[in-house]
Image: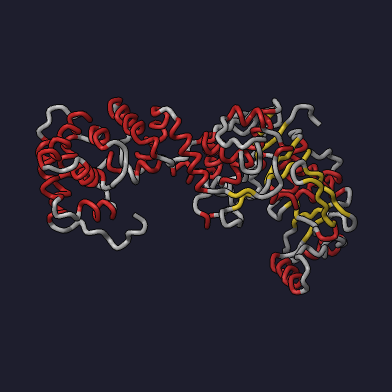
């Protein structure tokens, strides 16, 4: 066994990179970096029918988004290459043959239909379905007859039929499995590809992995892996199975809870450092009540021993709150760099904005950041900065735009703002308050309908500062548009007032 701490993150590129994958990658990265060890990225693509290059790209993008690097892997090399299992098929053959020669592996000719029939019979008898071992002791004549029938064969591992397999897990503690309940697993498919069980055991051994940190869903697989390691005379790594991540209804996190893919959270405008912080606290305690922790603080305090075995709840509201804390504290230029692609995806910013336009975006972000939790807010609630095409909220319609006194006020304000030679917060404020004085009204009686007309909302940052960031002609046009719609009684509140 290698003296250096070596861990691996080993995703299967068969779909999107979900938040559970990222959580596992993070804990492996934290342990490796804190211990001065090596982080290995290994691609487990033995599901040859579902693995795709696109899914592999999503894995790389997700890790890089969170700021997780790796020391060895497909695109960085290393002493144990190749790091893609489909490129290691010849390596596995020798280990399969060793199991066959020792009588610990055998050919199985059962068809999918026969296996399903077995499972149904076991369920009917009220026992957990497992392979019944009918091909365990076939003679050479039996095997030849099945080959002549055109049957394909896979290879199964012969597990122990008596006794227990005991797992000493760093997080879950001692876990015992009854060997009689396991059933012989397939280790080589009819296609010739190894299954997860064989490939992971061989690769962890050859790559000198010292600690396997993975989700608790893999705990039942570990009983098979320990038996395989014993049969192959391989020293097992230490295991640490991370607790489940649940949705707010305390069921396993899935698509029904909303976004679960890493790309979904990035698209919503979560900052990677906020997600790093949030995921680190799922299943691990820093030893204090602190919740906002820097990457360095988390690295300094992290330990597998401080991880709990109980499931963690992915509280979306708390994740958004934490993201808001990071947004509020961030440098506006940094935020603008993250906001820009979100706006471009929504067709609210041009593909190649000028330097002046980019600096304008920084000013918009700086004005809004204390009110924003998710950066996608800039495409919804703050849409008015980027386009005249926005909806009027019901509250804005009901409280201000549906008032018969509103059209003349908006028209008068539009005329005065149009005549301004300097477009600044001070000149805008002076014009708005001057009109209110002339009409004998409180400033609020002009400010509120103006905000409703210009932004479609009733709340937001300083009206005069936000107006100064919108083109003068656009503001004048919006005031006149709202005045016309209001006069024509076209700004009645809609029926759906609860959500607005």
Please identify the residue farthest to the bottom as the structure is shown. Answer: 124
From the viewer's perspective, tell me whether residue 194 is left or right of residue 160.
left
> Residue 255, position in %: x, y?
53, 55
Residue closest to the eye, 122 or 373: 373
The answer to which image quadrant residue 370 occupies is top left
Q: Up-down: is 487 above or below 299?
A: below
Can you give x and y, in whole percent of width and height, for residue 397 in the image? 24, 54
At 18% from the left and 42% from the top, the residue drawn is 442
Q: How many marks?
A: 0
Residue at image position (79%, 42%) is: 94
Along the line of sight, the residue nearer the viewer: 406 or 132: 406
Instruction: Work out whether 187 lies above or below 92.
Output: below
Q: In the rendered view, does 103 fall on the left or right side of 364?
A: right
Residue 50 falls left or right of residue 477: right
Quarter of the rendering occupied by the N terminus? top right
Residue 325 percent coordinates (x, y) = 47, 36
Report which quarter residue 414 is drawn in.
Answer: top left
Q: Residue at x 56, y 30 (%)?
A: 294
In depth, the one of 14 and 172 nearer the eye is 172
Colour scheme of the rendered structure:
secondary structure
Query: Residue 454, image x and y in percent?
Result: 22, 43
- Is residue 6 visible from the viewing direction of this image? yes
Which quarter shows the C terminus?
Answer: bottom left
The answer to whether residue 194 of the structure is visible from this angle is: no
């Amino acid at each position: 066994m290698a003296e250096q701490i070596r861990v691996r993150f080993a995703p299967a590129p068969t779909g999107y990179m979900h938040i559970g994958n990222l959580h596992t990658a993070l804990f492996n990265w934290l342990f490796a970096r804190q211990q001065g060890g090596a982080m290995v990225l290994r691609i487990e693509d033995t599901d040859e029918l579902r693995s795709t290059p696109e899914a592999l790209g999503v894995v790389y993008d997700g890790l890089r988004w969170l700021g997780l690097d790796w020391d060895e892997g497909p695109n960085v090399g290393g002493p144990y290459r190749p790091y893609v299992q489909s490129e290691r098929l010849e390596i596995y053959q020798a280990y399969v043959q060793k199991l066959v020669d020792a009588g610990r592996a055998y050919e199985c000719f059962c068809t999918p239909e026969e296996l399903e029939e077995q499972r149904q019979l076991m369920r009917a008898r009220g026992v957990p379905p497992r392979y019944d071992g009918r091909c365990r002791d076939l003679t050479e004549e039996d095997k030849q007859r099945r080959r002549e029938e055109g049957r394909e064969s896979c290879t199964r591992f012969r597990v122990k039929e008596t006794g227990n397999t005991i797992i000493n897990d760093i997080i879950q503690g001692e876990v015992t499995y009854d060997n009689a309940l396991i059933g012989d697993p397939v280790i080589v498919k009819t296609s010739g590809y190894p299954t997860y069980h064989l490939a992971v055991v061989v690769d962890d051994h050859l790559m000198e992995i010292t600690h396997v940190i993975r989700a608790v869903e893999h705990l039942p697989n570990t009983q098979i892996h320990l038996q395989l390691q014993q049969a192959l005379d391989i020293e097992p790594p230490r295991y640490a199975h991370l607790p489940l991540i649940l949705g707010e209804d305390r069921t396993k996190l899935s698509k029904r809870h909303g976004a679960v893919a890493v790309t979904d959270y990035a698209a919503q405008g979560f900052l990677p450092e906020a997600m790093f912080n949030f995921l680190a606290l799922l299943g691990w305690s820093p030893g204090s009540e602190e919740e906002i922790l820097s990457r360095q603080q988390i690295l300094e305090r992290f330990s597998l021993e401080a991880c709990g075995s109980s499931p963690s709840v992915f509280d979306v509201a708390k994740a958004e709150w934490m993201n808001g804390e990071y947004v509020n504290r961030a440098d506006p230029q940094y935020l603008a760099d993250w906001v820009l692609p979100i706006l471009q995806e929504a067709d609210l910013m041009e593909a190649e904005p000028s330097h002046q336009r980019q600096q304008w975006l920084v000013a918009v972000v700086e004005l809004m950041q204390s009110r924003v939790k998710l950066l996608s807010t800039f495409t919804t609630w703050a849409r008015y900065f980027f386009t005249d095409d926005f909806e009027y909220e019901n509250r804005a319609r009901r409280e201000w735009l549906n008032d018969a006194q509103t059209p003349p006020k908006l028209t008068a304000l539009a005329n005065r703002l149009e005549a301004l030679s300097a477009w600044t917060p001070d000149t805008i404020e002076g014009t708005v308050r001057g009109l209110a004085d002339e009409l004998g009204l409180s400033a609020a009686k002009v400010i509120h309908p103006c905000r409703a007309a210009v932004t479609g909302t009733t709340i937001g940052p300083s009206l005069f500062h936000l107006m100064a960031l919108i083109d003068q002609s656009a503001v004048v046009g919006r005031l006149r548009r709202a005045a016309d719609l209001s006069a024509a009684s076209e700004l009645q509140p809609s029926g759906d007032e609860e959500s607005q």
